[in-house]
Image (spheres, rainbow, N blue to C red):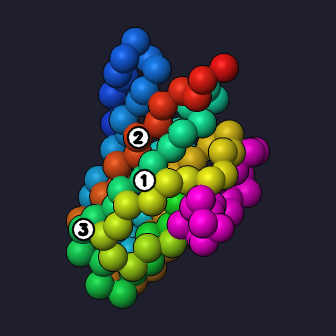
Amino acid sequence: MATRTAVQYSMDSGNALSIYWSALAGTTADVGDAVQLPAHGDISIQVGGTFGSSTLSIQGSNDGTTWTTLNDTQGSEMAFTGATFKTLRDVPRYIRPSVPSGTGTGLWVALYARRTAP
């Protein structure tokens, strides 16, 4: 299993963040670095790459050890077998992508988060 680095960009004086994980592959059972977004409640996810037989999921954890697939705003699991764009409903302490198996290569995740109004 390889852990892929999260590249983060801050925008609008920290009110918005863009986080990108690349080179994820099911052939090596990759996960992405876990990130914390304590002040950012509006989160959208875009995924792409060559999925093959892989399923890429967006996982969350509040303890950094036990991971669960998160849900989108429609209540569906954030588990992808092709390129798509969804908005995250759940807001855990930690978020990461995971590709536990399959033939997918060159998978990527782009997360955009903005602070919600107080």
Residue topped by disc 3 = 49
Residue drawn where x is 58% and y is 28% of the image: 116
Q: Residues within 10 Å of mark 2 (few under 14, many from 20)?
A: some
Residue drawn where x is 43% and y is 73% of the image: 80
Vertical order, 61 against 73 (above or below): above
Q: Which mark is residue 112?
A: 2
Residue drawn where x is 40% and y is 12% of the image: 13
Tag nearer the camera, 3 or 1: 1
Side (left or right) of 77 relative to 113: right
Q: Amino acid at mark 2?
A: Tyr
Res 74 → quadrant:
bottom right
Q: Magenta stretch mostly in which secondary structure?
A: loop
Closer to the camera, 14 or 118? Answer: 118
Side (left or right) of 19 relative to 113: left
Q: Position of residue 105 (x, y in %)?
A: 26, 72
Residue 71: in sight, yes or no? yes
Vertical order, 111 against 68 (above or below): above
Side (left or right) of 80 relative to 48: right
Q: Which mark is residue 25?
A: none
Residue topped by disc 1 = 45
Residue 11 inside the magenta-drawn segment: no
Q: What secondary structure is marked by label 3?
A: strand
Q: Which residues are magenta?
A: 59-78
Q: Position of residue 46 (x, y in %)?
A: 36, 56
Q: What secondary structure is marked by label 1?
A: strand
Q: Amino acid at mark 3?
A: Gly
Q: Amino acid at mark 1?
A: Ile
Residue 73 inside the magenta-drawn segment: yes
Vertical order, 99 against 60 (above or below): below
Labels in figure, total: 3
Q: Quadrant of the C terminus?
A: top right
